[in-house]
Amino acid sequence: FWLLVSVMHDKPCEMRGMFGEGMKETHKVLYVAEGLIHMHLPRVARHFDKENIHVTMYATQWLLTQFTSSFKFDLVTRVWDAFLGEGWKIIYRVMLALLQQWQSQLLRMSFEDILTFFRELPERVNGNSIMETALRINLKTR
């Protein structure tokens, strides 16, 4: 119980605002995620813009649940282990790692194919590989 209270209210997680009235923090998290995609994966960002794929169409569920809603347990446990220690940075890193790992395929897909791909993605993910990639992504705190 006290761990949940801490995750919701204390740094580095501070998840309470994600589920409050207006979900203000959710909008902030998605805004940051979109900016990071443009910064770290500009080709993917441009392609998604061209195909009218918005970050809310694939990343909302990932970010709201810290990947627990659809990804395999091996990835979820590693993400949460890091999340409890470093907070949001690991969530953004994993998101970027997922996009980076399948960047070449995503760049060849149309709108419908991209959405189908994201629905099926959790079954394809190797947790160790994604975490290795994620931990190599350098994010600076502003």
Image: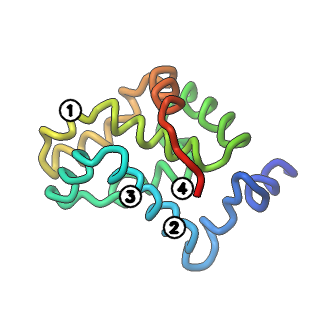
Mark positioned earlier in the residue sequence (2 or 3): 2
Q: Where is residue 116 in the image (x, y as percent from the top left)?
A: 24, 43
Foreground: disc 1 or disc 4: 1
Q: Residue 34 carries which label?
A: 3
User: Mark 3 falls on what kind of element?
Assistant: helix
Q: Residue at horizontal 26%, vertical 35%?
A: 103
> Dot 2 surroundings within 10 Å: few (below 14), some, or many (20 or more)?
few
Mark positioned earlier in the residue sequence (2 or 4): 2
Q: In this view, does 31 lie to the left or right of 135?
A: left
Foreground: disc 4 or disc 3: 3
Q: Position of residue 125 (x, y in %)?
A: 41, 27
**What's the residue type where badge 3 is placed?**
Glu
Dot 4 corresponds to which residue?
Answer: 64
**What's the residue type where badge 2 is placed?**
Lys
Q: Which mark is residue 136?
A: none
**What's the residue type where badge 4 is placed?**
Leu
User: Mark 2 falls on what kind of element?
Assistant: helix
Q: Position of residue 127 (x, y in %)?
A: 50, 25
CA gap, disc 3 and disc 1 = 19 Å
User: Mark 4 falls on what kind of element?
Assistant: helix
Mark positioned earlier in the residue sequence (1 or 4): 4
Mark positioned earlier in the residue sequence (2 or 1): 2
Extreme residue toward the bottom, this view: 21
Dot 1 corresponds to which residue?
Answer: 104
Quadrant housing residue 86: top right
Q: Position of residue 104 (x, y in %)?
A: 20, 32
User: Mark 1 falls on what kind of element?
Assistant: helix
CA gap, disc 2 and disc 3 = 10 Å
Mark positioned earlier in the residue sequence (3 or 1): 3
How many marks the image carries: the answer is 4
